[in-house]
Image: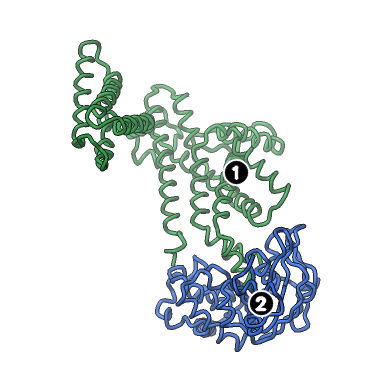
Amino acid sequence: MAKRIDVSDLDIYYGNFKAVEGVNLSIEPRSITALIGPSGCGKSTFLRALNRMHEVIPGARVEGKVVIEGQDLYGSDVDPVDVRRQIGMVFQRPNPFPTMSIYDNVAAGLRLNAKKTSKSDMDDLVERSLKGANLWNEVKDRLNRPGSGLSGGQQQRLCIARAIAVQPEVLLMDEPCSALDPISTLAVEDLMMELKEQFTIVIVTHNMQQAARVSETTGFFNLNGVGQPGRLIEYNPTEKIFSNPDEKATEDYISGRFG
Amino acid sequence: MSTSTQQPSAGPDTSAPSQGALGGHEKQAPWVPWAVFGAAAVLALAIGLLTSWNIVLFVIYTVVLGTLGTYLLSRVTEGPRKAVDRLVTCLVVSAFGIAMVPLVSLVYEVIRRGAERFDAEFFSASLQGVIGPGGGAYHALMGTLIITLLTTLISVPIGLMTAIYLVEYGTGRLKRSITFFIDVMTGIPSIVAGLFAYALFVLIFGPGVRLGIMGAVALSVLMIPVVVRSAEEVLKLVPNELREAAYALGVPKWRTILKVVIPTAIAGLATGVTLAIARVIGETAPLLITVGITNALNFNAFDGRMATLPVYAYYQLTQPGVPPQDAIDRAWTAALVLIMLVMGLNVVARLISRLFAPKTSR
């Protein structure tokens, strides 16, 4: 299921503003890749470019190549909707659909796409996804209650269950723990460690301990100044980034001497 | 009268937190403002009896004297800050009372005079062959319901789709110009909408044409901008995160709108539509031109004149016949029924927004 992502010479624009410039990297399958860097340096923009979500914003566009297992995401015959089916996303703030029950939220990916699924298959899928997101035991008795009634951490795991229910190849996570308390964060991190057996995971985080704990590879984004495009400064195994980075800027950032 | 005795009701509430740590004055007992207004009423009664008795003057004297008395007494016993508080309280409550006068008086008058003919015959008989007493507004009630239903059928799809376009798809100049013209349409006088529909149908059917559907078209011109406006506001309230969540699951945009955005906003949309119906159900001028009036039942909106409640009330009042009282009574009852319809729609709107509110929906 998991697939490899190769990015070459990627520039991302909002209208005429160049937000990210010249990104080259390869993301290994069945691993967790963390993206760190100061606010506004384009990590989230880059992440959203990986499943063409940034196109939702008017005027946003991309130059360069993103290739997943030989398939160019930005090829002229590629439907962004198909891309997003293969590459799921979890957002910063938990966003379960307020009109739907817990069950329906997990089933949403298939239901909204009008895939014909029998009731028992759907039950299986919901159970599997919720178990996959470590949420099953907490909600199995109240699957028909609204998803918005759960706690923040549970809602985020519900969103993860919803994302993995459509069986994507890659899971993108945009600061998935920044709205959660430490215990829920731990639950989500444990979950990520399990999920990487099946999925390629890319996570944007502001929490460097988190990047160090969960990821195999880390990318450091930075920008030279306000109004300048963000760049990928360093992309190396996490161990190296946090012990002996190649770049001075990376060392300054992770040791808190940033400025 | 009632407004004056309501006057000091807010006084006691505001006096509760009056005694702060720094307050060097006595706290006024809750009954004091009431007593002041009671004294003012006695004084106003005395003035009224000495000059010429007039209920309106009595109320005005009571309010003015009571306000002054409350202010002065409070200034002496509680200090200037508290006194200003009481003065403003009196003014605000007076303003509220003045605003309520027309509403209360209108409802009272319509109920009192409309109750005369609020009977089974009014809801079961038309005016066909009726001279003098008896007769009803069954035909007008049905006409109003049919024409309003047709208006809703025309306006809601157009209005909703326009709102969806504006919120989900529209960009640049087209969106701005649509928004501008919707604003202009909101301000169109209803008679102009009537003339538009009349002119349109005259082009097709020739002069003198009167059809129920013409009224529905005229009312749609008035209703569409209201629907667009309210639906646009409600759709804007749907958080963008939900749309993104759906996109990230690989759901196409149109399905996202259909299955996520609209269900999330359904309570607000239904409320907006209901209130828009309430807005047009009482329109008179456009129906006067386009639909006309008839004394007989006509269920077919595509054939000939129809009666509607507002136009019915208008004709019963302006051309009552001899003796006039029977027709005038029918006019008041028609007005009462119309008010009840509008109130009913408002209640329905509130129920809808409560029933469909997302969190409790399932």
- Give me the chain letter of mark 2: A
> How did the renderer colour the structure?
by chain
Distance from Cα at disc 1 to Cα at disc 2 = 41 Å
**Mark 1: which secondary structure?**
helix
Q: Which residue is mark 2?
A: A87
Q: Which mark is residue A209?
A: none
- Residue B341 location, x and y as percent? 43, 43
Amino acid type for the residue under numbered disc 1: Pro
Look at 55% across and 87% down and name the residue there: A194
Q: Which residue is mark 1?
A: B225
- Residue B319 location, x and y as percent? 47, 24
Quadrant in the picture for residue B40:
top left
- Residue A20 location, x and y as percent? 73, 66
How would you rate the neighbour count of disc 1 (Cα within 10 Å): few for under 14, some for 14-19, many for 20 or more? many
Of residues A210 and A166, the one nearer the viewer is A210
User: Which shade is chain B?
Assistant: green
Quadrant in the picture for residue A38:
bottom right
Look at 22% across and 14% down and name the residue there: B47
Q: Specify the quadrant that holds the C terminus of chain A.
A: bottom right
Amino acid type for the residue under numbered disc 2: Ile
Of residues A31 and A99, the one nearer the viewer is A31
Of residues B298 and B51, the one nearer the viewer is B51
Mark 1 vs mark 2: give the one in front: 2
Q: Residue furthest top?
A: B51
Chain whose colour in the figure is blue: A
**Mark 2: which secondary structure?**
strand
Q: Specify the quadrant that holds the N terminus of chain A.
A: bottom right
Q: In the rendered image of this protein, does residue B80 appear above or below residue A199?
A: above
